Image (tube, rainbow, N blue to C red):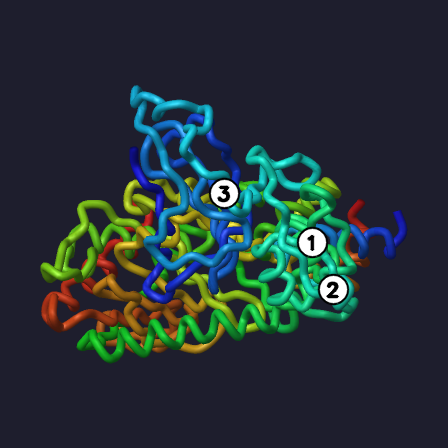
Amino acid sequence: MTEDDIRRAYIEELVRVAPDIDPATVRGSDHLQDDLELDSMDILNLVIALNSRFGVAISEAEYPRIATPDLAAKFLAEKI
Amino acid sequence: MAEFTMPSLGADMEAGKLVEWLVKPGDRVKRGDVIAVVETQKGAIEIEVFEDGTVDTLLADLGQTLPVGAPMAQIRAPGEAVPVAPAPPPEAAPEAVPPVKAEEAAPEVPRAPPPAPPVTPAGIAASPAAKAKAAELGIALETLEGSGPDGAVVLADVEAAAGAQAPRAPDRGAFLAEMRKAIAAAMARSKREIPHYYITHTVDLSAASDWLAQANADRPPEERLLMGALLVKAVALAAREERSVNGYFGAQGFEPASAVHLGLAIALRGGGLVAPAILDADTLSLPDLMAAMRDLTMRARAGRLKSSEMSMATLTFSGLGESGVEAMAGIIVPPQVALVTAGAPGERALVRDGAVIAARAVTFTLAADHRVSDGRLGSKFLTALDAKLQMPEAL
């Protein structure tokens, strides 16, 4: 799986958690909280979805490493 | 025969537009079943039925906007006989316009002998409902292929075309503007009618934070708890003790509620706000409460909340989440009599044993109705809330 594949999968899960986000408008540098207005409940839902999709356990301390699609693609690529 | 009517889904709702029927005549329903979807200024809401029975007649058409209280369907009680003659009584004149219902949309020919559909000046045969809808949506009738008798355009054809032409997403700006209007109207009314008073209290979260860190250490993400769940549980338990903040203000004055259905304010992207209720929040374990909050948040985002959730809150809680400012004060959602808000938890200078220390804390503000309680009762509530959060293991 390339980083691009992971980024695409991440955005798919993101939009499932927050269906009011238009995937076409999400940029790689968009921050979950600051740009996409996710709250802590949404982020937990996303972490759960990523965990089940990639089989990667993401601890609370690692949340900053999945805070944007670009960061998450890099982080998940290392972990998979 | 019971009449099923357009429910009120909050103080800010005047009407709703029927967008989907999930039942048809003859279907059995039981209390709590979702039988229709209605679009309101707060998004699409799944409408539940409040009694057991059998659907007799659907009275509302898809696309129809109905005021609160307008009849939508007739439901026979269990055991109630089917009203006379499924066959049309001889004296009954055929309906001028066969109503187009979801389950008989498109190719099916209406039951009643089709009266010659009125012909528009342009020579297009269309039912009055179809014409009205087409005019409302700005769709030219001659561009549509009719599925009614003799190729007449019926309401379903117009709606199908509308659906194809205009996907709903681009309307988000307009939707949020409508929601903002509804919020403004309800809040203006609340401030006009309810004599609000406000009290504030800062609660030390050291014990709750330590307990939470330990509780989450070994949990997989789907079982992790958020501080928000602890705050919600503590609010619900305190409301059970201090009943003057939990209930409704109606024509007879204050009616305390026996259950705590806690409305949870959820901010929507772009500036909307909904506050669906977690039913019996005081009785749920923290993991169950957490699951309910996650589910509610997802469905609020997807626009799939249920009518009971929109109408049953006995008290509302609004938290700023994990980051943001220190405190906020809110406006009560009528007919409720109080609103609890929390700023973002953070490090604060607290005094403990005569010394100033830095500790994690959260500031709660209670907005309450002076017709029902006063600062003394309100402060009992916030004091009880504080005590709950000092014993997180008991939440």
Q: Are marks 2 and 3 on the same chain?
A: yes
* Disc assigned to residue B122: 2
With B159 as the anchor, is B83 left or right in this view?
A: left
Can residue B214 be seen here? The reply is no
Q: Are marks 3 and 1 on the same chain?
A: yes
> In the image, what residue type sits under mark 1?
Ala
* Disc assigned to residue B125: 1
* Disc assigned to residue B95: 3
Give the image location of residue B328, x and y in percent.
Answer: 36, 76
Rounded to the nearest angstrom, the CA distance separating label 3 from label 1 is 17 Å
Instruction: Identify the subunit bearing mark 1.
Output: B
Element type where label 2 sits in the image: loop
Element type where label 1 sits in the image: loop
Can residue B147 be seen here? The reply is yes
Q: Are marks 2 and 1 on the same chain?
A: yes
Q: Please tell me in which quadrant of the rendered image residue B369 appears.
A: bottom left
Q: Residue at x 27, y 65 (%)?
A: B334
Give the image location of residue B32, x and y in percent.
Answer: 38, 36
Q: Please tell me in which quadrant of the rendered image residue A20 appears.
A: bottom right
Give the image location of residue B191, x and y in percent.
Answer: 26, 78
